[in-house]
Image: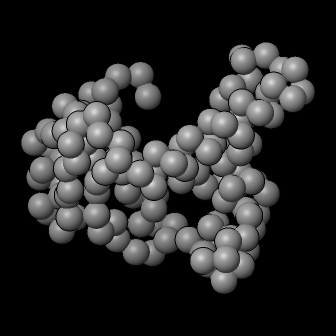
Amino acid sequence: MQKKRHMFAKFFEFKALVEKDNGSKVKALKSDNSEEYVSNEFKKLCASEGIQWELIAPHNPQQNWVVERKNRSIVQAAWVMLHDEGLSLCLWVKACNTVVYFHNRSPYQILEMSTLEKDLCHKTINAVNTIVLT
């Protein structure tokens, strides 16, 4: 995303994609008090769509620890992949995408050994279709 002002359009695209692929509505949005989230567009969308909007304190990752921990795990795994193979940091985005790709296709005990992709999309794994949940 080039500019913060594009956040609403990107969220709207993401919302449409999730609802089309998953067949269910977005129920909640949790964000900090950043200007890109606290806009009249977001307020109107959440009110009209019945989306519960929860604001967390800015610069307080403890309130959003699940996402912060997942992001940290992705970054650490990408760093290890690049470091172990002696690869350049210019491959950083590809390394992060690879970590997320495998994360979405790994079985989880909480999902009764199902994968995130299969559980979210109710379909079998397709190597061409990648869902990024970060």
Task: Identify the residue shown where x is 79% and y is 27%.
Answer: 82
Q: Is residue 134 visible?
A: no
Q: Position of residue 53 (x, y in %)?
A: 20, 58
Report which quarter residue 51 is drawn in.
bottom left
Q: Position of residue 17 (x, y in %)?
A: 46, 57
- 20 sits left or right of 56 in the view: right
- In this view, which residue lies farthest toward the bottom? 112
- 97 sits left or right of 58 in the view: right
Report which quarter residue 2 is drawn in.
top left
Task: Identify the residue shown where x is 60% and y is 77%.
Answer: 110
Q: Nearer the viewer, residue 39 or 67?
A: 67
Report which quarter residue 6 is drawn in.
top left
Q: Nearer the viewer, residue 59 or 116?
A: 59
Whether residue 46 is situated above or below residue 117 in the rendered picture: above
- 68 sits left or right of 123 in the view: left
Task: Identify the residue shown where x is 28% and y is 63%.
Answer: 28
